Amino acid sequence: MTITVNEKNRWEQFANKALTGVPLTVGEGLEVLQTPDEQVLPLLQAAFRVRKHYFGKKVKLNMIINAKSGLCPEDCGYCSQSIVSDAPVDKYSFLDKETLVAGAKEAMNRKAGTYCIVASGRGPTDQELNQVVEAVEEIRETMPLKICACLGLLSDEKAEKLKEAGVHRYNHNLNTHEDNHENITSTHTYEDRVNTVESVKHAGMSPCSGCIIGMGETDEQIVETALALRKLDADSIPVNFLHAIQGTPLENYGRTHPMKSLKVLALMRFINPTKEIRVSGGREVNLRTLQPLALYAANSIFVGDYLTTEGQLVEDDHHIIEDLGFEIEECAL
């Protein structure tokens, strides 16, 4: 198929809309997701115009520590730590303060500007929250890191306590479209997730909320999820691609094709132009050799391992950024 000038200009029209603050319609979003593969490069070039306008060529690095593994009463079908998972993952209670602080030092070594303390479970107990607070206070006193916490459902009171301790950002993903939510989990509602993000915003922390692509959702639902994240006004949007883990209910789901993954990232950039778009869990498996192209739409990645799956070598991520002519964003508190 020959790409016409008009087809190329279509993606530039979408970039212009993004730069003037106008979101794509659902129909336009579907055009992005259904882009012929031979048009992906001009699509990414248009997305890069938007990314470069707001973020230049900087790439934000984030590092996760799994502060509590397994032992989760929730039944999320994608998660190896859930009560319905038979995956052979480590199971341990909340890490002590010394271990959490040591993780922050490792984040500094990896040139990460944000350190993410993540724990399994429905939500933090008072004791677990106090352990996070004590660790965050010491980290903030000794290291120039931004701290993100991801501890599950959160009340207004607990959100305020984290904010007072110095947590900059709180992550709680929408994960999937509202109409697909009951196919993924039954132990909490889509509204529970939205309410937690609203509690985060009310407390004055930066809201981080994203999605997992590849859990049976339709293209239209992907577009509507991108629009829901825009409405939620999440400052940071992690875009995960399902890494189907043996022993979980979604173990037989196939990966999202690398070209489709790139189209999703371009869509997220057009609809959420001013927000941090992070290529997150599953990028190594789903994007595979096309990982570098993702940074023409996204401006953030995780470095190192995820919660129960391995990432690639930190040096490889540093090399991708260097080889693209991009630069690692320094932490600015």
Image: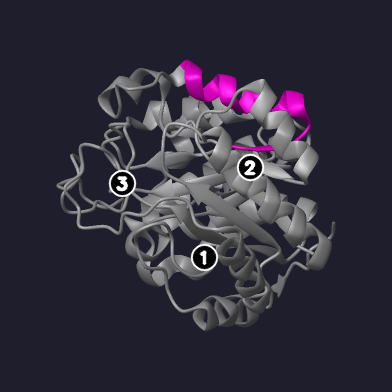
Amino acid identity at mark 3: Gln
Asked if residue 325 is among those painted magenta in the image, a careful observer would answer no
Tell me which amino acid carries mark 2: Asn
Which residue, given by chain and number where applicable, does mark 2 sit on? Answer: 130
Residue corresponding to mark 3: 81
Q: Where does residue 99 sit, x and y in percent of width and height? A: 56, 65
Q: Which residues are magenta?
A: 191-209
Q: For this rendering, which residue is in front, 50 or 242?
A: 242
What's the residue at 57%, 19% (across, down)?
195
Under tag 2, what secondary structure? helix
Mark 2 and 1 residues: CB-CB less than 8 Å, in contact? no
- Magenta part, dominant SS: helix
Per the image, the residue denoted by label 1 is 293
Residue 233: x and y, percent?
68, 29
Above or below residue 37? Residue 153 is: above
The quarter of the image holding the N terminus is: bottom left
First in sequence, mark 3 or 2: give its number. 3
Rendered view: 4 above or below 104: above
